[in-house]
Image (tube, grey):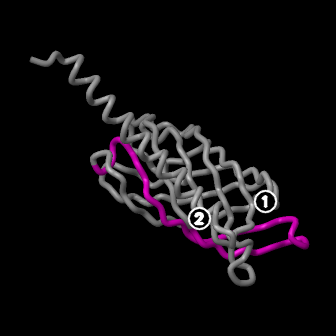
Amino acid sequence: MRYPEQVAEDGRAAHRCRHRSVVAALLALVGIGMTSPATAGDVSLLINGKAFHIDPPANTNYNERNWGVGIQYELDERVKENWVTFLQASEFRDSNRNVSAYAGGGLMRRYEFRSGDVRLDAGAIAFLMYRKDFRGGNLFPGVLPALSIGTPRVALNLSYVPKVDPKMVPIVFVQLKLTLGKL
């Protein structure tokens, strides 16, 4: 006979194992991009920090401080003139205060202003994500619009998450991107 404490601990252990597997997959994805001899792009630290929930239901208490950390790696600086390809992996506290993680890659069109001192990148990111309370805690794919505005060293990354489930509300998600330099 198993005690409730044992059942609860088994559930936590399974969650930790699944969480570690996701983190390992995220690191492997980023590592693959960084080991290719054709890459010579910038590495950036991502600091997750804010979510704006659009029209949440009354009496809800969503977490809008989505603290976490991640990494972004721009593959070629530009595949073609004014296009940026990138890999990204990140972990953060989601709207329900659970740890979430994702890894993926994207393509954005770069617009430069003031001789390249200010940049606006617009495009999309495709990813695999883990959320404890979504899709049974299994990895799921997604594609979201992505926008980045700032300088070559510091930028704000923004993404819009539409309502894809009756329990969710649309979200604007914000990250601070700090470019560390080239690999």
Question: Whole-percent x and y of residue 29?
Answer: 53, 58
Residue at image coords 61%, 47%: 70
Q: Which residue is mark 2?
A: 146
Task: State which quadrant residue 106 falls in.
Answer: bottom right
- Mark-to-mark CA distance, 2 and 1: 22 Å
Residue 82 covered by magenta stretch: no
Residue 117 covered by magenta stretch: yes
Which amino acid is tagged 1?
Lys
Residue at image coords 81%, 73%: 112
Q: Quadrant of the C terminus?
A: bottom right
Question: What secondary structure predominates along the stretch shown in magenta?
Answer: strand
Residue at image coords 73%, 65%: 41
Question: Whole-percent x and y of residue 97?
Answer: 45, 34
Which amino acid is tagged 2?
Ala
Query: Which of 132/181 is in front?
Result: 181
Mark 2: few, some, or many residues within 10 Å (few <14, many ≥20)?
many
- Residue 67 as seen in the image, left or right of residue 151: left
Q: Residue furthest bottom?
A: 80
Magenta region, residue range: 106-135
Residue at image coords 51%, 56%: 103
Q: Quadrant of the N terminus?
A: top left
- Residue 63 as seen in the image, left or right of residue 44: left
**Can you say whether 60 is above or below 37 in the image?**
above
Q: Which residue is mark 1?
A: 182
